[in-house]
Image: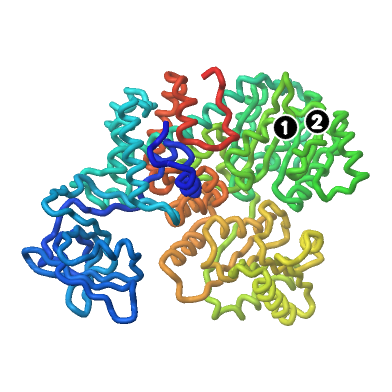
Amino acid sequence: MQLRGVGKTTEKYLARLNIFSVQDLLFHLPSRYEDRTKRLPIQKMRAGHVVLIEGVIQSVETPLHTRTKLLCELSDETGETHLRFFHLPLFLKKALTVGNRLRCFGMARLGPHGIEIIHPEFQVIAKGQFVPTETHLTAIYPTTQGLTQNTLRKLIAEALQKIRQENNANELLPAHLITTHAMPAFIDALHCIHQPPSQTNCQDLLEYKTAWQKRLIFEELLAHRVSLLHAKQLFQTHPSTALTVDSESNNLLTAFREQLPFSLTNAQERVCQEIGHDLAQKNPMLRLLQGDVGSGKTVVAALAMLRAVQNNQQAALMAPTELLASQHYQVFKRWLEPFQIEVVFLSSAVKTKERKATLAAISSNHAKVIIGTHALFQQDVIFSKLALIIIDEQHRFGVHQRALMREKGSTDHFHPHQLIMTATPIPRTLAMSFYADLDCSIIDEMPASKATISTNVLATTRRDEVIARIKENCLQGKQAYWVCPLIDESEAIDAKAAIAAAAELQAAFPTLQVALIHGRLKAAEKEAAMQAFQQGLIHVLVATTVIEVGIDVPNASIMVIENAERLGLAQLHQLRGRIGRGTIASHCILLYQPPLSEISTARLGVMRETNDGFKIAERDLALRGPGEVLGERQTGTLGWRVADLMRDHHLLEDVKKSAGYVVHNHPELIAPLIRRWITHSEIQVNPDL
């Protein structure tokens, strides 16, 4: 569809706003609205109010020594006011002559001569001409230099008129959903958002409370959920290797369980059954495993991998960092090598000779369990019989990258099962949006042997008491973390603060070993310090960077977090999860700089009250929004046009039901919905739809 007046220059300006089509233009929604529907008598103007007035120019003054400043006196039958202009272009200046009738819009303020308007928008009304006021509220759009509000309004008005005439605004919601939810038609919703009726409450528009806005929000949320359900449906049409295990006592899973020094919790047993059921199917598993810090996800992952090994297949586990991947490797090697299972490690840091041998073991099926970083998905890694992929801490990889990861290890005949593990508890409302393509298993029970963690919130004025407590604990053979979170954009400044903290602690503990990790250290130096801490050679570890999720030091039983008021609940909970990994009662001390803001007081109060990650995640959602719970990278990549998960989470239950209805009863709408709302190139659409 072509619009009048869109030449190469206008196209260039529109492109700056990511507008490349008529659909993009119509989804370029107003940021606010102005009411230009009612003309106000000049006598009733009040300072601080935005007004629409009309009158005749009585005088024009140009201050000496300037050609661009102008002061006009404007009057109507009720009174007079002044219009003040700075830097006025010559062609506009010519329009401001005595006797001309102007219609002006702007903010009234108190000036030297009484009420005035600075730089109003104005139009000249010819003598005897009747120009009606606007019949609808005036939209104000996000724009760019070179593209005026008037140009945007004209283009959008033309686009709305054309799609209505050409019936080009396809209604993509089934009549049943529109009737059930009493929603307006799509074209009516778009029209009223761009040109709201004059009686519309502007505040309702700003807060997205109108039926027209809710219609678009609902459809966008629906499109995202449908896209994920469709991706799952499409993926599960492929075959996979059924990983069955007989019930006889001589299988690997039974032998592995018997050598564990602990029993699985009821929650772990339930989750193992859910995963086992999926793995036994001839279509690929897509499952999310949620479990709070220390709930025992790793042993569940090991049992899933053993199902692959039992069937002479391979299993791979990918972690987001070298340190975490290395720790997984050590744990799995210790657990599985007694059963003559070859476990290999692969990352970008593995030397060439060792890498070559590892790649050969993977491609020949000698290596049954492969642990690594994203290096597992490089082109030269060729799996022989990859049947299961486990991705740890998936939220760091972004929402739609899951689809890309599924392709690794896939052949023309088989696709691997996929298990995604996260220690970031996800509120149910958000899980419905972000993980609609995954079945969900939750380990909602802690092992009985897990150490308790108590949390204290203290002002920095009690810092000396805290240092004395650290010293006492470390002299008893325990270890401690001292965390200095990033408080400045400059790594140099933060490193300096951490170096000062480490020096202070070393002076206070002359007989103890204090190590330091900060952002300016090389990766090898960080890893060496962390390994020394894991081995018990370091008593106190001072860190500026977030200590890796999943790093396991059972002897570390005390943690101090400075400037705790600057961190979100998710970060605080993950940091606290580094202690209490063994059987020793542990303590977390949150130091803050008074005075505390209201939100910081609430956040630290939550940390003191509970260790339950799911309760913390729900409070985090309420306090900070989905970006804090899932990570800005993930929520950002969704590219919402109208919807906001925090504001609109109350719609998600209805969206969930409606998405199921669309997928099962109206599959012909899936592709159009995805095309309308989702721009991610990774989203695959079944060409048959």
Element on which disc 2 rests = loop
Q: Residue at x 85, y 48 (%)?
A: 350
Q: Is residue 69 above or below residue 645?
A: below
Q: Residue at x 48, y 54 (%)?
A: 620
Kindly identify the amino acid type of the residue bearing the numbered disc 1.
Lys
Which residue position is annotated with label 1? Answer: 408
In the shown orientation, is residue 467 left or right of residue 151?
Answer: right
Q: Is residue 464 above or below residue 424?
A: below
Q: What percent of the width, then of the height, locates residue 622? A: 42, 53
Element on which disc 1 rests = loop
Pointer 1 local density, CA inside 10 Å: few below 14, some 14–19, many at least 20 = some
Q: Is residue 571 above or below residue 228?
A: below
Q: Residue at x 52, y 39 (%)?
A: 434
Which residue position is annotated with label 2? Answer: 383
Q: What percent of the width, then of the height, locates residue 442? A: 56, 39
Q: Are marks 2 and 1 in contact (CB under 8 Å)?
A: yes
Q: Front-most of 210 and 330?
A: 210
Q: What percent of the width, then of the height, locates residue 44? A: 11, 65
Q: What percent of the width, then of the height, locates residue 241? A: 72, 21
The answer for how far apart the CA atoms under marks 2 and 1 are is: 9 Å
Q: Earlier in the sequence, mark 2 or mark 1?
A: 2
Kindly identify the amino acid type of the residue bearing the numbered disc 2.
Phe
For residue 157, which quarter of the picture?
Answer: top left
